[in-house]
Image: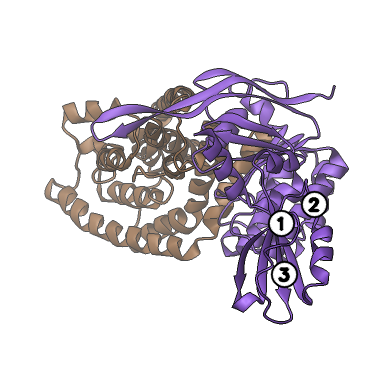
Chain colours: A brown, B purple
Amino acid sequence: MTVRTYVRLFVAGFRRQSTYRLAAFGGLVANATFGLLKVALLFAAVRTSGGELAGYDVAMMSSYIWISQGLLGSINLSGRTDIADRIRTGDVAVDFLRPVDVHLASVATEVGRSVFALIPRGLPSVAIGAVVVGMAVPDHASAYVLGAVSLFLAIVVSATTVYLVGAAGFWLVETRGVAILYMVVSGFLAGLFVPIGLFPGWLHAVATATPFPSMMMYPVDILSGRVEGLASLGIVGLQLFWVGTTVAAGQLATRSGRRRLEVQGG
Amino acid sequence: MTDTIVETEALGRDFRVRDGLRRRTVVAVEELTVRIGAGEAVGYIGANGAGKSTTIKMLTGILVPTRGSVRTCGLQPVPDRKRLARQVGVVFGQRTQLWWDLPVRDSLRILAAIHSLGTTAERERTDELVERLELGEFLGTPVRQLSLGQRMRAEVAAALLHSPRLVILDEPTIGLDVLSKQRLREFLVAERRLHGTTLMLTTHDMGDVERLCDRILLADRGSLVFDGTLAGLSRTVGAERVLVVDLAEPTPDLDDVPDTRHLGSEGGGLRQRLGFDPDVTTAARVLAALSGRAELVDLAVEEPDVEEIVRRVYAARR
């Protein structure tokens, strides 16, 4: 087992996603439309509270909106994955015939897919926001570097966490119910609808005890310049913690789930 | 004594299935004991539900056995799954191992990386497979746009890219036309001759068994009920062959040809079917006996198909 193998699988995911250009364009249109809707709602909220709401002014709110909208192509908030389908149909049998770690191979492919999606959906979304509405940016160049790292970790945490939903299929025949629950909870706690900084204290505590803010809120905080310096390093550390935790859980689930594998349909 | 590639001892697997509210246990494979040597070509046949696919999945480490022991290529399939995967290639006729939305070439490259093939090894083996399986014309086509025949050839290339010692094919020719089947079989025969590859295939197609296999395993609920050659199997079940003759003009039933049994006539005696036992007489002798009686336009010798043999074996056991 070599790193080259997983890099190749990452590239495979990237290339696969690149074949769906029309779908990417459709996704961008949807993201931009909802982005404008969020602009209307959240800007109104900021203005009615006197130009600042929980540390957000209009420019900062704009950054939050357009970066988070741009991440939607790369962060899995639907709970549905290839691996879930492959476990349900039994195609996962083919994965087990390869000299690779099925869990890490699946994550590598998913991360490749997500990184590609930044090109047709992430960058244009941010560009639309910058041109149409205007955005706040970090003061220091180092924030962009750390922001890029945080963004990549967000993509990884998303892939390793949503893998667990698919792995539930080793025990459940049908994981659609779990996926729907995931869809409802993950978007909300990741900070898709409003920044988690606007949550009441107890809900904020709940959110930070889950891996979801690591998928969206934290990289947005760094890239918009809302969190800076040592605090931003702390955020990246927290993301790393969630990568470690979810990878460990994924390894465990795959290992014990495999013993229950029944391979449906011949 | 040749190297042992597959060795099982009382290997079995049960499944728990939901039956309404209750759960019950279904025995897919009861107790399989078999040894397959290096370089053999084994046809594994049996009715649907005879446990063939389950057995294959236990041999390759996909499924965990409920009981018994199994060694494949000298390894324990479940704990040594990744090491075993480098020595085994599997083609599932009903599943794909190619990347659906990428060109065939990309799938082969990814698989080469997965199997850690060196650049030279990758190029040589890819070129060899592309040439012998005639993949050249559609190497750049996304897999989802391939015809079934093309896809199966690509699947075989994908399974054999890492030059496995053991190749397992689960219904490899299902749904293929005659020509595609023929090409695939020729390729497998050549692969075996060139590289000494061990073949194991499950099939419902008698042609696969005849052209590819020198040993037959017949399973019933995952227990072997026959292990030997095809000729031996035919003998066991008393499989008579059928000589079909088309005659120049309507002829009365040929029901008195020595050592044959008249099975039926069509078209007022234009086509007649005669059964004979290959151990008692030969097709040539039957023809000689016929030659004075009627003018032959065409003839064919039919052998019992896999389903028929399997049915007869099962019937004899119950």
Q: Give the chain letter at badge 2.
A: B
- Mark number, residue B281: 2
Q: Can residue A101 be seen in this view?
A: no
- Mark number, residue A247: none
Residue displayed at 63% across by 52% down? B305
User: Crowdedness of circle 2 by 10 Å Cα count: few (<14), some, many (20+)?
Assistant: few
Rendered location of residue B227, percent (x, y) = 69, 32
Decide if residue A122 is on the left or right side of residue B47. Answer: left
Point out the tag, 2 or 1, that comes first from the N-terminus: 1
- Mark number, residue B260: 1
Q: Do pointers 1 and 3 mark residues of a single chain?
A: yes
Decide if residue B43 is on the left or right side of residue B92. Answer: right
- In the image, farthest residue toward the left: A48
Give the foreground label among 1 and 3: 1
Q: Is residue B244 visible?
A: yes
User: Crowdedness of circle 1 by 10 Å Cα count: few (<14), some, many (20+)?
Assistant: many
Q: Identity of the amino acid at label 3?
A: Val
